Image (cartoon, coloured by chain):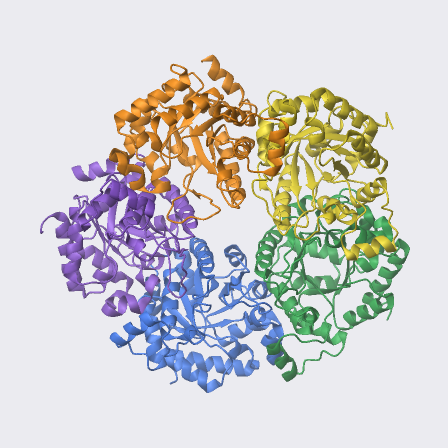
Chain colours: A yellow, B orange, C purple, D blue, E green
Amino acid sequence: MNERVREILSWYSADNPGTLSSLARMMNHGRLGGTGKFVILPVDQGFEHGPARSFAANAEGYDPRYHFQLALESGCNAYAAPLGFIEAGAAEFAGEIPLILKLNNSDSLYSSKDPCPAITGSVDEALRLGCCAIGFTIYPGSSERNEMYHQIRGLTEEAKRKGLAVVVWSYPRGSGLSKEGETGIDVAAYAAQIACQLGAHIVKVKPPTAHIEQDAAKKVYEKQRIPIGTLAERVRHVVQSAFNGRRIVIFSGGEAKETNAIYDEVRGIRDGGGFGSIIGRNSFQRPRKDALEFLGQVMDIYAGKTK
Amino acid sequence: MNERVREILSWYSADNPGTLSSLARMMNHGRLGGTGKFVILPVDQGFEHGPARSFAANAEGYDPRYHFQLALESGCNAYAAPLGFIEAGAAEFAGEIPLILKLNNSDSLYSSKDPCPAITGSVDEALRLGCCAIGFTIYPGSSERNEMYHQIRGLTEEAKRKGLAVVVWSYPRGSGLSKEGETGIDVAAYAAQIACQLGAHIVKVKPPTAHIEQDAAKKVYEKQRIPIGTLAERVRHVVQSAFNGRRIVIFSGGEAKETNAIYDEVRGIRDGGGFGSIIGRNSFQRPRKDALEFLGQVMDIYAGKTK
Amino acid sequence: MNERVREILSWYSADNPGTLSSLARMMNHGRLGGTGKFVILPVDQGFEHGPARSFAANAEGYDPRYHFQLALESGCNAYAAPLGFIEAGAAEFAGEIPLILKLNNSDSLYSSKDPCPAITGSVDEALRLGCCAIGFTIYPGSSERNEMYHQIRGLTEEAKRKGLAVVVWSYPRGSGLSKEGETGIDVAAYAAQIACQLGAHIVKVKPPTAHIEQDAAKKVYEKQRIPIGTLAERVRHVVQSAFNGRRIVIFSGGEAKETNAIYDEVRGIRDGGGFGSIIGRNSFQRPRKDALEFLGQVMDIYAGKTK
Amino acid sequence: MNERVREILSWYSADNPGTLSSLARMMNHGRLGGTGKFVILPVDQGFEHGPARSFAANAEGYDPRYHFQLALESGCNAYAAPLGFIEAGAAEFAGEIPLILKLNNSDSLYSSKDPCPAITGSVDEALRLGCCAIGFTIYPGSSERNEMYHQIRGLTEEAKRKGLAVVVWSYPRGSGLSKEGETGIDVAAYAAQIACQLGAHIVKVKPPTAHIEQDAAKKVYEKQRIPIGTLAERVRHVVQSAFNGRRIVIFSGGEAKETNAIYDEVRGIRDGGGFGSIIGRNSFQRPRKDALEFLGQVMDIYAGKTK
Amino acid sequence: MNERVREILSWYSADNPGTLSSLARMMNHGRLGGTGKFVILPVDQGFEHGPARSFAANAEGYDPRYHFQLALESGCNAYAAPLGFIEAGAAEFAGEIPLILKLNNSDSLYSSKDPCPAITGSVDEALRLGCCAIGFTIYPGSSERNEMYHQIRGLTEEAKRKGLAVVVWSYPRGSGLSKEGETGIDVAAYAAQIACQLGAHIVKVKPPTAHIEQDAAKKVYEKQRIPIGTLAERVRHVVQSAFNGRRIVIFSGGEAKETNAIYDEVRGIRDGGGFGSIIGRNSFQRPRKDALEFLGQVMDIYAGKTK
């Protein structure tokens, strides 16, 4: 086994061999296999935003098999999706690409200030479908946060017992936070910490801004002169906040944006010591050929094959 | 086995042979057996609207056995009803007609803006009564949607483990939507997607209108020029939204209406690639002879035996 | 076995022999044994209204054994009461009178517009005490109705698996209805239908009035000219609404009233095809001798031995 | 076995020998052993009112062992306390004094109009600690009453299956009642009835006043001329309301008060046919010597050794 | 075994040998091993206050292994932390330092007047990770207190059955109390009593002030002249309120403060008979060398090696 993969696995010494194998499967797969870096393809937008908003731009994406294929061809480490999308390809692509079953989702036909997604899968469903990890979203800052923490706590205990890895999307949101605060550096670092404390193996957060949301935090950032001026610095702080870099932290791409802007963002994540990206809309909404080229470029940045 | 049935079953490759057999039983039964098309008789109106509003127009319908007989004689693929109605004929008609046990229902003696039906059956009850599928209603757009998603998630996992198929009525309704929005094309397509992502094998939605409810969706429909002018186009979009046509989507008849209007609607569904209809009040509220003729005509349209 | 009893049991062909035996035990017991008619003694008023309001008028009734004795001597088909009252006589009267354990009850030291009784027993308690049925109250029209439906659904599944019969008191009440509407004919028929759909073997409703509560129902009653002028006609409609007479529907006596008025009511129920009465306060609040005479007279009306 | 004890046990003929033995252990223990009368020492005030308010007056009481010793030396039938207090002496006093584990408790650092105590123990904890009964408080009249009834229902079923007795503190309180109504005679009698219907073996109520809370009850008390002028008469009515005297009803002492007033109250309870007293603060807040003398005097009144 | 340890264990005579061994492991470990005194290092601030506020002052603390090392080197009796932090060192430090898995935690991205922490671990997780105790926070005074009591009740029963010890952080807070009241002497003593009654082996409270919150308590403190003038007196009263000193009560350090002030506080705790301290921020936010010196000094005060 690759030394870097072995090193990263050593951080998870409380886990059983089954779970370590699941983590290793993701780290050894694809174009970034063996580097300890990650690019994951997530496709839950059909549930979260509706089918037309997600797939009309590149209509091949209506077919669930398209995304398995895209993740496989582009060399992603893993493909993450809700139950229905995974069911629709799990047998056909059995064993070809590590799968993450996303266990909770929100639709946007009803929305509330303090969100709490619906549970849409289970650990046993993940096993049935041959997945190597479960995925779960928490919204720190929501009045419903405890409900989500309770859910992931139980799922994490079960997943670890059954040899799966745990990927937590930690997205601050809700009446405890301002809109700007959702991506503030103090909040992003805190969100990473919470997910790690809850037992996540892999944490996904949004790229943080230089905004500081909480007064009590602001004093500390100023007093300790924590550098947060550049994205690389902020990423470094978030990674430090994830058990001093001993948990895998990856960053989401967010809304569709201009390609070079994404490459710049990826460079910032890489330079700050981030472990990779999870890129949905920015990949599957492009034509297949463009998406492959785009994802290849992103992976090369992480692999250090390109600036 | 018929090629078309075999093809449709191939879309459900994550399911065990028990569940595939249950799906096949419905597809191989009745006048449309082997075509991959569906006409299902649902009779939950006694619970939903009360006995007189449901059965007084054709008083034979007060007797639960009438509907088993009607579904059988007309050549429907399956008969769907709540616990009491199924219990009242399951032994007498054992093995003669595929049964769908409807597991949740709402009565109209109390109503609320954000509906959530009562659970009225279980997977084990469905097995006890010899059913091949469970049926379940979700109301996307209701503040109670997560409760319904949680319920169907657990029921789906259990049903699939025990060899049953899952039919989801996906009816947008609640304070997240305008009245017109309940049948808007973006909402209908989204409702189909949600049901598929939750793991439904068969999804039932209402025939969509050209209304677009959500601003974020409107932009996409306009930008991508998604054709929604005719019912056939809208049905085609809904079917595409159900995993690019790899999930069975059928359409409800809605309120009693003029017969020719229904035939036109059925033609639109057929031309758009819809898999069939689920027709309650429009069949069992007619005299038996008329109902048989009417259902025969609908089936012939789907079978392509008539325009 | 008596032909009429055999016929009635044939309506419950989905049930196992244990449950059929429990139903048969009630139908074969007492003065109406073998007629398919029912008079049941229910004594939950101690819980529902308090001891003095229930028993002071005939103080023998404070003793739980009194009611076992009364039900036995008068020839009732069964005796129904909450846990405590059943426990207090179940051993002494073991096997002498069919027992129905009432599994939910409301007290009147606190009341709310939308009632939901407390669960006060279980199926296993019913088995432990030698009962042949469970009893349960639902309040359609209450905002809490779904909670009650969920409870009875689970209890019904368990009771049927364990060979017990299920008796449902279906009493419309709550903010979905006007006071007059609680006994309106459309609501009473609907209440019977709901209980049957939930899987009840025996349904208890209140004698309906000619009031029609819901506008949508009113149109149907008028259009279909459903006869509701006399009590017998209304009873006939309720019985029809209970699966076209293929479920046992009995009627409660309600508040204590003048004896001849009750006899008239019983005649109306009989003439409309009702299956019998459940008479509490009107029997146990009379002196024992009067009660025996009164109940004998009611049974004779049902048996057709008297007009 | 003593005849009176045997007679009382005959009232509980639905219970298994294990539970009958537990009841017998309490009736055969202490100074009142064999008389069928009860004096129980309850010490949950540390949880309910706080340590200083409970124990500062007689500081020996801070030590949990003090109360075991006091109950033992004074010849009480049983000692009742929450989990912590029982754990702190159960091994040291194993087998020396019947124990009642109080399974729910309220603290007074937060209070609400409609109280519902916290569950603080379990049936299995009672077994682990060698107790012969569980204790539980219900507050009829509270909007939370159903929650408490559900809890005690389940606990009662489990306790009886596992051979324990059930003691219910039935204390009307909450927004359904006026302050005066909490101890009104109609309410006290109703509270006793509810506890008995819920399956309690021993019911504890407060000594009732002549106040009548509910209008519907008032009419009956007046019409039937139920005597409620003296405490003895009121106790007699409460005992009658507890299944005509076939359930053990004991009375609480309430707030600390003048000694002779308590003796008078005890005489009233005795003369009305009450089964005894449960006396907390009035015993353990006195110096040990005074407490022993006081409890001895109370027991002698019940035993008929003194007027 | 040391006599003092043996004596303390004798107070827990209801516990099984497994749990006694777990208590003994903590009492026999570290610089205070065998004295019956405790200094525990808790590090849940990353979850409670966020990573920067917790660890930026001494950035080594971002690494979870730092705290294991600090607790070990300083000679603490045990180290307490949430799931993630324990997982990150449990294998590397297996068997070297007694561990307490903190089972509930609150983050500060959302806050409410009546707090209730999220459950973040389980008894089985504590066993999996080799811990000897579970830790749990209750907030008496919060409207959510019963929820917390229910949770700890179940966890306590399970932990004791599985041989673990139970440490309860009893922190009065919520709408039932004034801000000043949270640390008032009557409230602190009451909080200790509640935790003991709930079955805690070790109780952690805040050093109390001379404020008295509740009127009913105030009368007693005055009438009984309970001495509360000095910290030592107040600690003595709290210890007495914890079953007359027969439960281990330790005190938290609270906010970072001046070192000599802490030493004084520790002397007060020692002089009042307190069993020790639990010191988080005041230790891990100092440089390692200072922290070791500081903790050594605190332990020496408890050990009586220094004034």
* Near-viewer residue (A9 or D57): A9
On the rendered structure, is A173 left or right of D178?
right
Placement of B159 over or under C112, stated as above or below: above
Image quarter where the N terminus of chain E lies is bottom right
On the rendered structure, is C160 left or right of A208?
left
Q: Quadrant of residue E112?
A: bottom right
The location of residue C171, given as percent across then percent down, is: 32, 52
Placement of C209 over or under A280, stated as above or below: below
* Near-viewer residue (E234 or B151): B151
Residue C301 visible somewhere in the drawing: yes
* Near-viewer residue (E39 or C234): C234
Residue C2 visible somewhere in the drawing: no
Image quarter where the C terminus of chain E lies is bottom right
On the rendered structure, is C135 left or right of A134?
left
Q: Quadrant of residue C174?
A: bottom left
Q: Quadrant of residue D193?
A: bottom left
Give the residue furthest to the left: C306
The location of residue E179, given as percent across then percent down, is: 69, 69
* Near-viewer residue (C265 or B93): C265
The location of residue D286, given as percent across then percent down, is: 55, 81
